[in-house]
Amino acid sequence: MITPPIPENEMDRLMALSDLDIDYAAHADSFKDLTKLAARVAGTEMSLVNLIDSYTQWTISTHNLELEQMPREESVCQYVLMGNEDMEVPDLSTDERFKDRPYVTGGPEMRYYYGIPLNIDNHNIGALCVVDKHSSKDLNPEKVELLRIIAGEIINRLKYMKVIDGLKNNLSEAVQTQKKVAHDIRGPLSGIIGLAQLIKEQGDENQMDEILEFMNLIHKSGRSILELADEILSADKKEKKEIELKGNEFNQVVFKDKLEKLYVPQAMNKQIKFTVNTSSASETIPFSKNKLLQITGNLISNAIKFTPVNGTVTVSLDLVENDEQNTLQIKVKDSGVGLDAAGIASILQGSATSTNGTVGENGYGFGLALVKHLIESLKGSFNITSTPSDGATFEVKLPQAPTRK
């Protein structure tokens, strides 16, 4: 078996990728023009933008090829992570590393490959690659330089997307502030209107015609402002009065949908039953989505890796409410090979080493270390319960802001 390549700075590389906090299934349209342009420049039939985490190569954009993900150890782009140089394979079918891969022996029968590192802060997080069914394409220096420019633009867009997400969050907070202001002004305005009404009612007895007219105007103006406040407060309300999600939030329903879209294909590929359960009592309550896809995704990929064919992987989500602080609970339970006490301790201490999966999947040894680091950065807790040959349960608890009223 060919040993998978692992960059010397793998943990830092994974941290750089996780800092982007990317939803791998949400940005196909963001790079569609660049993947098409890359294929046109190279004169190839297909092109892809691939990002590579601990377990999976995620194809976030593609031209002329239906592909969303593949195991990291089966990819060509994993070799591009090893340095700052481009990588060319004239004929994949004659290269010992790739000649038996399904995408070479079967559809789409790839032959030519050229990959350019996607580098952010001196860490390769993936690759822009152009591929073709025919071997030995002629990429002159001008074409190569254009492809590198396209790769640079991909990185720029990834950075911009993070900034835009932050701006959307700020905008959402501004809307919430606007609604709070509307709440705050209702009380004083109601008092003004009440006073004006009282003076209006008594004005005729005191023969205060001018004051009466003035108070009448105040009354009308105050009523208009009160109606405006009501309009602001009622804007965008949903029929079920569900709490509106901000740009940086999930609820359990949305989170479940994301996890199923990303990881059902991995489970199906290994004939594993994958289920995500939510808590009906709290499934619409918002919580921060910061790093959740990276944390939970690594745990799910790890569970699938160490669960045999026809096994099960179950994710359970819950949000425990408290006046001071909510707690998001994530449990990933598998029916896999399990862990002994020493194995659990090594993971929790951050000293675990890589092992192969139940059907020989290559291990890289950084997925759970990254999970532990991310959970600690969010001031959460991480617990593992398991016995050898009887599966494992990984439990994550993350503090959240209290429920918005």
Image (spheres, rainbow, N blue to C red):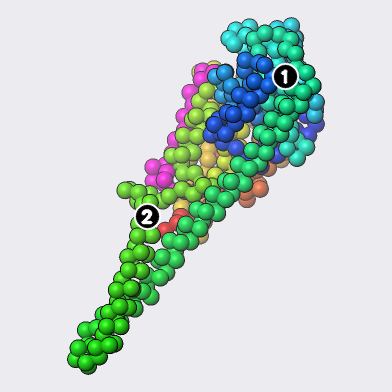
Is 284 within the magenta? yes
Image vertical order of residue 215 relative to residue 227, above or below? below
Image vertical order of residue 330 relative to residue 215, above or below? above
* Residue to which mark 1 is pinned: 114
Name the residue type under label 1: Tyr
Question: Residue farthest to the left?
Answer: 205
Quarter of the image for the N terminus: give it: top right
Residue at (75%, 40%) from the top-left corner? Answer: 121
The answer to whether residue 56 of the structure is visible from this angle is no
| Magenta stretch, residue numbers | 268-287
User: Marks 2 and 1, Cα distance to the nearest angstrom?
Assistant: 51 Å
Please report whichever mark, 2 or 1, sits nearer to the chain's N-terminal start. 1
Q: In the depicted view, which residue is nearer to us: 92 or 262?
A: 92
Image vertical order of residue 210 relative to residue 140, above or below? below
Q: What secondary structure is the magenta-colored segment mainly?
A: loop
Image vertical order of residue 193 relative to residue 377, above or below? below
Residue at (49%, 49%) from the top-left corner? Answer: 246
**Few, some or many residues within 10 Å of mark 1 (<14, 14–19, 20+):** many
Give SS at disc 1. Answer: strand
Residue at (36%, 74%) from the top-left corner? Answer: 189
* Residue to which mark 2 is pinned: 235
Name the residue type under label 2: Ala
Residue at (57%, 34%) from the top-left corner? Answer: 30
Q: In the depicted view, which residue is nearer to us: 376 or 117?
A: 117
Give SS at disc 2. Answer: loop
